[in-house]
Amino acid sequence: MEHDVVVDITSDSDLVTARAEARALAARLGFSRTDATLVATAVSEIARNIVVHVGRGRIAMRLVREDRRHGLVAIATDEGPGIQDVEAALARGNAARGGLGLGLPGARRLMDEFEVTCGPERGTTVTMTKWRVLDELELLRERRRDAAGR
Amino acid sequence: MNAATASFQGAYTGAFHAFLSDDAEANLRAAYELGREAVGRSLGLLELAEVHHDALLAELRTAAGTEDVDRITLAGADFMAEGLSAYEMVRRGFTEACDVVDSERRQARMLRQLSTLLADASLAVHAQSSVEEVLQLVAEQTLELTDAPWCIACAVSGTGDQTLTVAHTGAPQPALNEVAAEAFAAIATGTDHTRVVTLQTSSAPIALGAIALTALDGDPIGILAAPARAERPFSALDEALLVHIGQMTSAALERGRRYRGHAIGG
């Protein structure tokens, strides 16, 4: 893992920082503008959840480079009361707000991997990843770089 | 245009103008917030497109030259993409919901069909051929519901002989009799009557989703088993379907057994 970025989320204005960091990391990994927008949106949704439901938390973002793909992992943590029914929250989101599928379910649908875990008494961790599969030319370049580095 | 849309358009035009003056993340975020607001207000995608094009046109009219036109147009694409990201979440949710509804409708229809057939009194006759008919029907329906490559529906007669019916797609499976016997031994004799088991047959190990068919007193009277496809492991839904079909089959077989017992007893 590399390029860890941590953004403290304590107010609505921190969404801007989180979005900007997510977009910059996505650009560094070579994501398309569309995918970078989707990543920024997903990060916005989980940051907003922290602000609205808990008040404070943090989002750590890092890059992951595997053999055939590169990924951006965002991990949002808070010390709030947790989510009583994670499955329902992921399926419908906040029904009181119309259940339009924004928030957690919206973020889940924009990312490739998404997991929510709650602590035994308090705290929620959302881990989500967006992958970019490398094309053959990129793989060739990576192999050459590795060979040159040896 | 109604008052709510006009108010939205005013906010959108102002936010786009601010973004053109300074393309900082804070001004791009405004587009994302407006997109969320549009979704919340049930503003249609076509209405959002109209609002965006009006805002874009207003800015292009003030362009100083070709380079400025390019700058405004590219910025417009970025701004609109942010607004559309909220719609993208909803669209993906809609697609997901449609898939779930389609799948549930299909399953409900098939289970209703299977339930009706298994409840048919004509199957509860004392001829052995009716048991085979039930098993064949169950195997075929299981194939269709789970998309498994083949299926085993097997009932054990009172004397311990196996009445075996096998339905399959593609090439016939020569080892199905062997698999049926092993699967029955693995599932029916254990305490957990529903599980995925891996059988070591003479040719190769096979992972099977299997459920024991049971009498009212819980005694195993057969099995229903199907392998997962190589490219797709058994899902929770597949397992739930297998359990549901197995329970209906158990009820049908048990009814037939009792009917036969009653008929023989006179």
Image (spheres, helix red, strand yellow):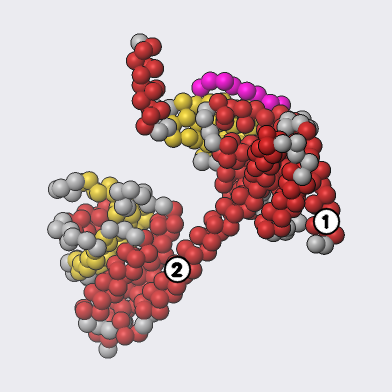
Q: Nearer the viewer, mark 1 or mark 2?
A: 1
Count of numbered badges drawn on the protein: 2
Q: From the viewer's perspective, is B166 left or right of B118?
A: left
Q: Which mark is residue B6?
A: 1
Let me know if residue B14 appears in the view: yes
Q: Which quadrant is home to the C terminus of chain B?
A: bottom left
Q: From the viewer's perspective, is B190 left or right of A110?
A: left
Q: Nearer the viewer, residue A130 or B103?
A: A130
Q: Rate crowding at label 1 as few (under 14), some (14 to 19) or many (20 or more) other CA atoms within 10 Å.
A: few
State the CA–CA distance, disc 1 to disc 2.
44 Å
Mark 1–mark 2 CB contact (< 8 Å): no
Q: Is residue A8 a member of the stretch shown in magenta?
A: yes
Q: From the viewer's perspective, is B172 left or right of B220?
A: left
Which element type, helix, strand or loop, lies under badge 1? helix
- Image point (61%, 43%), residue name: A107
Percent from the top left, x then y, of residue B103?
A: 47, 63
Residue tagged 2: B106
**Secondary structure mainly formed by the magenta segment:** strand
- Image point (42%, 32%), residue name: A134
Asked if residue B95 is positioned above or below residue A103 in the image, the reply reads below
Percent from the top left, x then y, of residue B116?
A: 40, 79
